[in-house]
Amino acid sequence: MPKNNLRSIRKAYDEVTDKEYDAEVLLKGREEAFEVREIFTRDGIRPVCTECFQPLMISHRKKHLFLSHKPKYGPCDLKSGVWSKSEEESYYNAIATREGPRHKYLKNLIGERLSKVEGVEVNSISIDNKFIIREDGKRRPDVYCRYKGKELVFEIQISHLSLRYILGRHDFYKEHGIYLIWILDDIDVKNQDRFELDIKYLTSYKNFFLLQEESEEFNLLCRYKSVRIDDLEVRSKWKKKFIMLSDLKFDFQKHEVYWYDFGLEEQRAKDRLPELRKIKEEKDERQKQRLERIKKKEVVEFFKRELLEIWVKGSHPYYPIDHFLSYTFTQEQNEYLNSLLKLSSDNKKFKGEAILVHCVLHRNDPEFLDIILFSDFIDLDVNDTGKSNTSLFQAFYIKRSKYSLEGYWWSLFKRGYKLKDTDISFLRKEVLRFLDEKEFERRLLVFHTYEQLSSLGDELMSTANENRELLYTLYSTKINKPYGWRISFKQLVDVIIKTYPSQWPLVRVAYEHFHGIWDDVINNDHTGMVSRNLQSIENRNITLDYYVLQLVQTLYPELKEPIEGLWKKYRVTDGHWTSEI
């Protein structure tokens, strides 16, 4: 850099040719540099700064030519020298990436998809060619549009940027009422780097956005931290949601855009804690007093009466019934209690309906259901329908808005529930009322999986529920046609690698094992998409989940041997320990 008041600029945008130049290349040779200077003097090129877009001039010192800002023009971070050397290097790397094929592809795809979104002014869409000029500077976003009267800009980030650069963009757009959406190319929420943390903590919402490329419409994948209260503690967990532009929310005071408001939900949860703690203290005290009163009573007879009271009056249990059944009662006492209740008896009906079916359909008794259904020590016939022919499965589905169903599904199948043809017909009819055949396929496969895992414990059921996309993909390979998916096997490679990379080793094993699918995918990779994805995933450190491996080996024993080979190639963890390669 020349040692005078003029700071050299490495990258410049030429308004004449509409290209970006590297000044160190353009002005490298002495003879060539003075030829460029002559062209500049004749107005053959008009270089401007890539950061502030103010005109640049060709300066020289001791026969060395370089680009610099004109002395009396407005402020610019590159001109002022406020950036450190590493920040400046990061900036120029980002400029180089902006002209790369991946960056160009994404911004053109965003512009194309925005043109199909209702509410977007099509004539307002600008792809890397609109300057937003204000008194304190100007910016050229990757994509700009007007949506329902609001100005939106999209900044695509493939390379890492300094916090100073990020804040500069964020503050400029926010100051002038423009909504900025950062589009990331990839994100590992469990291992966020410095750049991703800088983006997350820009706002209190903690949302990441990625473009859903395989969709025909403008869809984003939002990764967000969901808040919940667990054991009277406020906790959070990363979740994901596919959203459209119309799903986004706009903070008109802060001029920020989000889908899930982490800050608001976290504060609401914290505000609820005192009330929940008080409720628990009162409940514990009532439980203590009640247990003291029943010490001299016959325990089995007492619990029978209490269960009936819950059924008749819908009262809340103030004591841990399942704890007594599991740890306090002897086997003989449990058998005696079941002989009194007779819930597994064929004649235990209520107005012609099986007692649990009636409870789900016509009563608001979640406490009774929890005790009866979740306890392994109360005998129960979950397949009984009574005279109504309405199964317990159908009853829960009909009343799904009242119950948190995932736990009930697991308990139902753990109790030995068998899906009936009438259940499948019912499920198809219910799903197709609002959704399509693919969604029906997905739900049916999940239920069949629960049925298959019914005797193997909650961990595998939970793992199956959290890895549904893997279930759809593996079953598709076994039957040799996409099941629950609307895309081909080749397109699935792109989706799995980009969205569910930790599942890819298992998917590839299935592709290679079933029906020659892998050979077909490779032989038909005319565009090179599969090869590029394979190259990208080879450079990533993938850790496999122990329970996912157990799940796949349980559902597909024919894949046991190739899956065992993955233990030698990848690290495996169950959340508490991690194997070494």
Image (cartoon, helix red, strand yellow):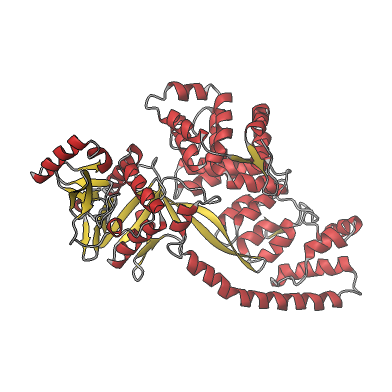
Which residue is outermost to the front? Answer: 62
Quarter of the image for residue 293 reads bottom right
Viewer-nearest residue: 310 or 29:
29
Residue 500, position in %: x, y? 52, 41
Q: Quadrant of residue 212?
A: top left
Q: Is residue 407 left or right of residue 499?
A: right
Instruction: Name the residue furthest left.
Output: 42
Give residue 259's position: percent from left, percent from top: 42, 59
| In-image side of 563 versus 146 (left or right) | right
Which residue is more in the foreground, 219 or 361? 219
Q: Residue at x 15, y 47 (%)?
A: 46
Q: Is residue 299 in view from this perspective?
A: yes
The residue positioned 62% from the left and 35% from the top of the image is 570
Tally the marks. 0
Q: Position of residue 90 (x, y in %)?
A: 38, 49
Q: Quadrant of the C terminus?
A: top right
Image point 89% across, 55% down: which residue?
Answer: 331
Residue 321 is left or right of residue 263, and the answer is right
The front one of 416 and 472 is 472
Q: Residue 419: tell me if it is visible.
A: no
Q: Nearer the viewer, residue 34 or 300?
A: 34
Whether residue 244 sits left or right of residue 233 in the image: it is left
Q: Position of residue 363 (x, y in %)?
A: 63, 65
| Residue 211 against residue 340 in the figure, above or below | above
